[in-house]
Amino acid sequence: MAKQRWWPFALGFLACFSTEALATPLPPGSDAWSEGSRGTIRGITIGPIESALHPKRGYGSEPFERTLLEAKRLGSSWVSLTPFARVNDLKSTGISLNFEAPFAETRRAIVRSVRQAHALGLRVLIVPHLWVESGEWRGELDPGSDAAWEEWSRNYRAFLLTWAEVARESHADMLSVGVELRSWLTTAHAQSFQPILRDVRRAYPGLLTYAGNWDDIEQTVILGDLDVIGLNAFFPLAEKDGASFEQLSAGGRGVRDRLAKLAAFWQKPIFFNEFGYTTRENPAIRPWEWPDKMSHVVPDQGAQAEAYRALLSAFVDEPWFAGFFVWRLYADPDDMSQEAEWGFSPRGKQAELALRDAFAAHWAGDGPRELGSALWRDAATGIGRF
């Protein structure tokens, strides 16, 4: 992106997410976000339910449509879909497109899901994930030898091009080219990713992003080739338990200052591909910790909501901030089997109220505020409310 061109457009973002607007494709390119007048993303990640024990309750189903309606009523303008593929372990070079359902079934479900979302005036981001069967983190994948890395690159290219075709077929609005691929995209091995990106550009006409991890996004070398910089924003907001809201808010401002430098360096907008906190005491200390691995947890809805406000309130006035996707709801809104009550979902909790406030707020990325129509948004009371 030419440095002199992005900043003048930043304040011109418009929050226009009508069904009619969705009929116009979102063109990719170096100035895609600003020239497309996107507005701030108010997004919700909707997780899949692919288990054979829960048929007709995943993506593309009637329950999924009810989740979309909930997202719409909350004020969401985007949803993120997260289909998975399998990798055996960190040394693997192969990728299986089959997860808990055959890929052909998953493909049909994703296409239906995008169309369901568009019919409700919601834009869609598709984020293909890798699930490591050994339970290890995908960010530490390391096939080993140069030959093994080449084989991995070939197989990842096939995986990503398959999803690029699905995104093109369904007219998805944005596609993530990877999730937390630290060992690949922050190292010399990243040079093998450039031709993959070129091939994806040819296969898919929409916007491209990447979900980098919060602690390695500055070292990720492909950011200049994206339309908008995405990251999984599980930043700790404090170092010690019992932090006050003021201390958490200071942590949020520290995150903002760090990312402002990244946006200025690349002259590109930044959004949170994922952000969220579990429903427990001190969730902003180690927010990446998975709820399934916790025991003897006392749920704390107030702490979850407070962490939401502390982080998001730091970004409201930043024109380079393109928005966020909260992690997460599920394809069946009534399915309670996917995570414990102290999990990430804000549904029916105090965090849902904080999310409503954030969705209703006027963000700098929306462009100039219209007096009168949005004044009520400033009436929310309470520390950290939008």
Image: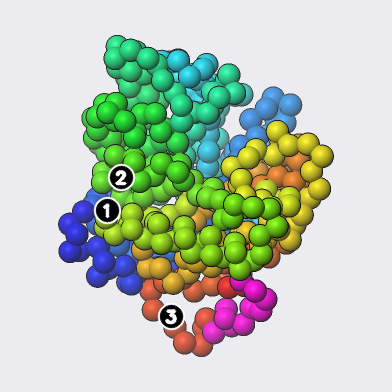
Secondary structure state at the residue bearing disc 2: helix
Look at the image and say whether residue 209 sits in the magenta stretch. Answer: no
Between 240 and 63, the one lying in front of the other is: 240
Q: CA distance from mark 3 to mark 1?
A: 27 Å
Which residue lies under the disc numbered 3? 369
Res 110 seen here? yes
Residue 52 appears left or right of 251: right
Viewer-side residue, 315 vs 76? 315
Q: Residue at x 71, y 35 (%)?
A: 292
Position of residue 19 measured from the top left corner of the image (x, y, whole percent): 47, 61
Q: Position of residue 86 (x, y in %)?
A: 52, 22
The magenta-colored residue range is 375-384
Sequence-wise, the earlier of marks 2 and 1 is: 2
Q: Which residue is mark 2?
A: 223
- N-terminal of the two: label 3 or label 2? 2
Q: Are marks 2 and 1 in contact (CB under 8 Å)?
A: yes
Give the quadrant of the C terminus: bottom right
The residue depicted at 39 percent of the width and 29 percent of the height is: 183
Compared with 106, 254 (above or below) is below
The disc labelled 3 sits on which kind of residue? Answer: Arg
| Residue 249 in the image: above or below residue 294 | below
Residue 9: percent from left, percent from top? 27, 68
* Of the image marks 3 and 1, the number of the one nearer the N terminus: 1
* Mark toward the viewer: 3 or 1: 1
Residue marked by disc 1 = 266
Q: How many marks?
A: 3
Q: Residues within 10 Å of mark 1 (few under 14, many from 20)?
A: some
**Residue 81: x %, y % from top left:** 52, 42
C-alpha separation, residue under disc 2 versus residue under disc 1: 7 Å
